[in-house]
Amino acid sequence: MTARETRKDPEQHSGEVVAGKKVLILHNDDVHTFDYVIEALVEICGHEYYQASQCATITHFKGKCDIKRGGFSSLKVMKDALMERELTVTID
């Protein structure tokens, strides 16, 4: 296998969602502060501070960010908790 083939693994970067797996998406709302969003992601989603900070930054500049992947039932609990904090989140 060449170095180029090693870097481009189609299974890792195909963009396909594995059967049964969903994505929790945070949407930009132009209301909440970075610190507020970061704190929520750390407490509710179990992110490390650095990961939560990057998610908040991506959401700010791109309008949305995938913040968690998993089964629907576990993501629904996180979605509801984030929505209680008035953050805009969806499950796809």
Image: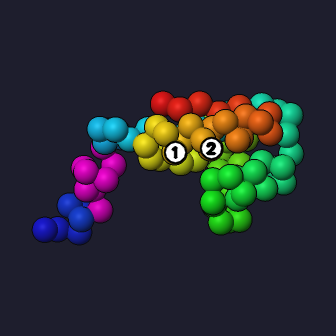
User: Where is residue 90 drawn, in percent x and y?
Assistant: 59, 30
User: Where is residue 7 drawn, in percent x and y?
Assistant: 29, 62
Task: State which region is magenta.
Answer: 7-14
Tell me whether circle 2 and circle 1 mark residues in contact (CB < 8 Å): yes
Q: Is residue 74 visible?
A: yes
Q: Amino acid at mark 2?
A: Met
User: Where is residue 23 drawn, in percent x and y?
Assistant: 48, 39
Q: Is residue 89 left or right of residue 74?
A: right
Q: Is residue 70 left or right of residue 80?
A: left
Q: Residue at x 29, y 38 (%)?
A: 19
Q: Residues within 10 Å of mark 2 (few under 14, many from 20)?
A: some
What secondary structure is the magenta-colored segment mainly? loop
The residue to which callout 1 is attached is 74
Coloring basis for residues: rainbow
Q: Residue at x 84, y 49 (%)?
A: 36
Q: Amino acid at mark 1?
A: Ser
The residue to which callout 2 is attached is 78
